[in-house]
Structure formats: structure tokens, C-alpha cells
Image (cartoon, grey):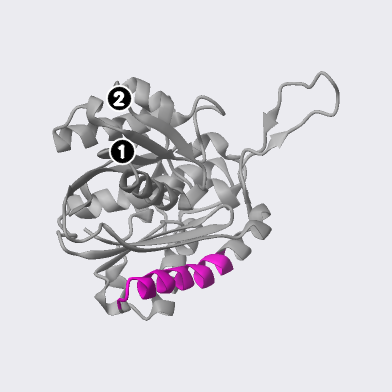
Amino acid sequence: MQNLKIISTASYHPPYVVTNQQLSIMMDTSDEWIRTRTGIRQRYISKNENTSDLALHVGKQLLSQANIQASAIDLIIVATMSPDAYTPSTAAILQGKLGADKAVAFDISAACTGFIYALNTAEMMLKSSNWQTAMVIGAEVLSKLLDWNDRSTAVLFGDGAGGVLLQKREETVPLILARDLRTYGKMADKIVAGSTIVGKTFPKQVTSLSPFKMSGREVYRFATHEVPTSIMSAVNKAHLQLNKIDYFLLHQANQRIIEQIAKRLDQPLNKFPVNINEYGNTAAASEPILFSQVIAKGLIHPGNIIALSGFGGGLSAGTIILKY
């Protein structure tokens, strides 16, 4: 029986590190203030690479590790809230740079839930077609969306990319055991970045984009209540108990949010790997970066059952239960 299998994982971050101490020179904040509220100690910031450049690093790694050619890729999906441009899509730019000429390529914009939505989309498209191989990448250069004078948001985010390569294989067990996807559009104004400011005259002036804005308390309340609900729903759909989940790989938004979700699920914190201290919040890239890292470290092994969960702009939340 043909089912999907993850045949490679990869991640990339720009080389430039910005520490909390550096930010304390730029704005009214401190290392202690940031660490105690978020768990973040540093983040990687792109100096001259755009989102497609970060994605390209990941794409090349994925192909190299799987030992396949770009010409074998049927589908490329990039999840991002910081694309290179309105059009072309970041995925189309990536397709061209990789030389994956036969691949259908498009972006998904669902902020920090983007990779979860993209992975689900890729799985359904592969299963309903004669395509064999899909590349799914979360990539962000969030630093270009930030107001670096706003300490409530600028200290939270970083740049990076991560992804997976999916392929149809003779597997008896499906890759995705269950899913739960949710959108809360009535709370759309709680996280906003890059909204277009439209001129009132005709002909219109060149538009400008607003920097990242977030209602921190409302988002914290949303994440700590709705994410456990999404996880439980997906676990129940998979006909499993929480104690059967080997690891919970959550969007790396805030250390305190992750701890609170673990508490609400009554699960040990050691089942919730984190890298937010090093990377900050990388939005759609955070789950695939973490996924790639825990696999590289040997923490996750074939046969493990993983809960991947993203949450953020939209507002949105999504959980996948997968058997690695």
C-alpha cells in the first residue's frame, strides 16, 4: 500500500546573531526582561538574504540528503508570512533557483500555522494525484516586517527556514494519523503585519506596509486555551491517548506558552522540545526547524508518534498527529 513518508528534513538560519544584550542598546529593554517573559536569549537575523534564499538553502539540503534530483519534485509549497514579493510566490522563485522545472509551486500564508497547513495540503495533493514527491518548506525573514523601536514585538522574532521532503512509498501506516485545523477570523486583528496602507487619491500612490503589531495578552490567552483543544481533538481523532504521543513539537512562540500548554495537557515538559532560546519566534519556519533539529540529534526515531502544532496569525491553530 502506498503511503507518504518523510525522506529528509533540513533547516537553515542566517549567520548573523543578535543577542538580547544588543537589543538592550537599541531600545528600552534588557536581557532579563526578554528572557523571563519569553525564554529567548538570541535570534538569527538576515542581513542580505531574502526569504527565497533561506528556503533555497533548505531545499538543496533536502535533495542532497535524499539523494534525488530537483527534476523529481512534483510539488513545492512554501509557508511564509514574509514572502519576497506579492508575486511571484516565494515557492515559484525557489522552484526556478532549484531547477525543479516540472514542480507545481505556490505559497501558503497562514503565519505561524503555515507549515501545518502546508504539510496537510501537500499530503492531500499527493494522495489525490499521480505525483510522487513534494517539498514543503516554512521560511521567514520576519526582520523586514518589524518596527525595531517597538520592544513589545521586535524582541520576539527571528529569521530562518526549515522543511521536509515527502514521497510516496510502500508503507502500511499513513504518515498523518489525524489532523485538526482551525481559523478564528473574528480575531484577525490580534496579529497584523504588512497590511497595505491605501492612498485616498487617484491615481494611487505607491503603497507602504505597516510593521508587525500584536495584542500580546489576547494572543497568549488564545494560545494557552485553543492549542490544547486542537491537540486533544487531533489525538482523539487518531484514537490515541495523550500518553501515546512521544513528543509534542509546538510552534516556538514563547517558552511560557509552551509550559502552560504542557500543564493543561498534563504532560511532562520533557516531551516538549524547545529551541526558542536560540531562534526566537520564526513563525512558519519554527516547527520544521525544530523537527529537523530533534531528528538530527537522534531524539526522534522511526515509529515515534509526534504531535506537530502551530498557532498564530489569522488567528489560527492546527495540529497534525504523525507517525515518523
Q: What kind of residue is marked 2? A: Ala
Nearer to us in this view, 29 or 241: 241
Residue 62: x, y in percent? 23, 37
Mark 1 or mark 2: whose residue is earlier in sequence: 2
- Give, as a single range, the part of the protein colored magenta: 220-240
User: Which quarter shows the N terminus?
Assistant: bottom left
Determine the residue located farthest toward the top in the rendered image: 203
Camera sees residue 47 = no
Does the magenta-highlighted stretch encompass residue 226? Answer: yes
Q: Is residue 17 above or below residue 1?
A: above
Quarter residue 54 falls in: top left
Q: Which mark is residue 100?
A: 2
Q: Which residue is mark 1?
A: 135
User: Which quarter shows the C terminus?
Assistant: bottom left
Seen at 32% across and 76% down, the residue is: 239
Nearer to us in this view, 317 or 38: 317
Q: Is residue 2 above or below residue 260?
A: above
Determine the residue located farthest toward the right in the rendered image: 201
Q: What is the C-alpha distance between the residues marked 1 and 2?
A: 10 Å
Seen at 39% across and 69% down, the residue is: 234
Do the residues under discs 1 and 2 have CB atoms within 8 angstroms?
yes
Nearer to us in this view, 91 or 267: 91
Residue 38: x, y in percent? 47, 60
Q: What kind of residue is marked 1? A: Met
Nearer to us in this view, 248 or 167: 167
Residue 257: x, y in percent? 46, 66
Quarter residue 320 falls in: bottom left
Q: Residues within 10 Å of mark 1 (few under 14, many from 20)?
A: many
Residue 197: x, y in percent? 73, 34
Q: Is residue 34 above or below residue 48?
A: below
Q: Taking 192 as reference, is 178 left or right?
A: left
